[in-house]
Image: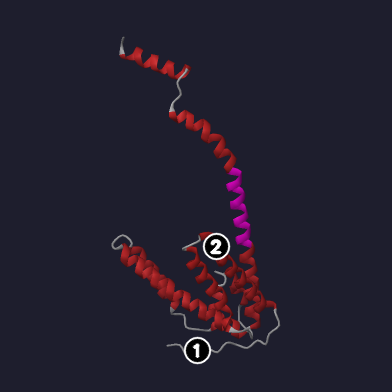
Amino acid sequence: MSLFAQIAGFDEALGTGMTSPTSSLGGLGGPLLGSFLPLIAGLLAVMIIVFIVIYVYLALAFKKIGTKAGLQNPNVSWIFTPLVSVFEISKMHWWPWPVLFIGLLLSQLLIFVSPIAFAIIYALIAIVFTVMCIIWHWKTFEAVGRPGWWILIPVILGIVGILVALASPIAGFIIMIIGFIAYLVLVGLAAWGTGKSKPAPRSKKS
């Protein structure tokens, strides 16, 4: 029997009785994938809607806070909410921004040379910028007559959530969500609650 005849016979056997592994997987994976696609699309739609709602809420809240604090252009809250707003209201020096961009650029270059150096620089940038964000929020809350230590509540809950997540990811995630909700509530109180506003003191720029 020639080689072509053998191939033809093998193909005929596959067509009549035998099934290939890929065809079996395709028959099983098709319905499963089809059943999960609507769920994945629904979750994505919910996430996008939640993100937009939170973004608009924070933009409106920090616009109100900026107005109460005497910010010249409170509409800046719509840009990179809420970092630009809290930075402007705190009236602190601008040096963290170039440090952030230069550090991120340097870390991206080092990722191909030394992953350890990349991780160290990235961690240092994250720590420095987190500390500065806490200070900016502290001064922002004080600028509208609210306790600056309010910002420590979501920060502490976030740290606790990360530590708990090492033992129980679900419990840690829930704690971090509670911390974020606390942040949203405190920002809302600072924006629309009653409080004696006072302009944040301008620090000396070096």
Q: Nearer the viewer, residue 95 or 163?
A: 163
Residues at marks 2 and 1, CA–CA distance in whole angstroms: 41 Å
Q: Residues within 10 Å of mark 2 (few under 14, many from 20)?
A: some
- The residue shown at (38%, 67%) is 105
Give the image quarter of residue 77. Answer: bottom right
Residue 155 is marked as none
| Majority secondary structure of magenta residues | helix
Q: Nearer the viewer, residue 103 or 30?
A: 30
Tell me residue 185's x, y (percent).
65, 73
Q: Are discs 2 and 1 less than 8 Å apart at CB?
A: no
Q: Nearer the viewer, residue 108 or 137?
A: 137
Height in image: 9 above or below 160? above
Judged from the image, the secondary structure of the residue bearing numbered disc 1 is loop
Give the quadrant of the N terminus. Answer: top left
Height in image: 136 above or below 16? below
Instruction: Look at label 1 and name its amino acid.
Output: Ser
Tell me residue 202's x, y (percent).
53, 89
Tell me residue 187's x, y (percent).
63, 75
Give the quadrant of the C terminus. Answer: bottom left
Color theme of the render: secondary structure
Tag nearer the camera, 2 or 1:
2
Q: Mark 2 — residue?
A: 171
- The residue shown at (68%, 85%) is 195
* Residue sitting at the far left: 113
Q: Is residue 86 left or right of residue 18?
A: right
Q: Is residue 88 magenta?
A: no
Q: Residues within 10 Å of mark 1 (few under 14, many from 20)?
A: few
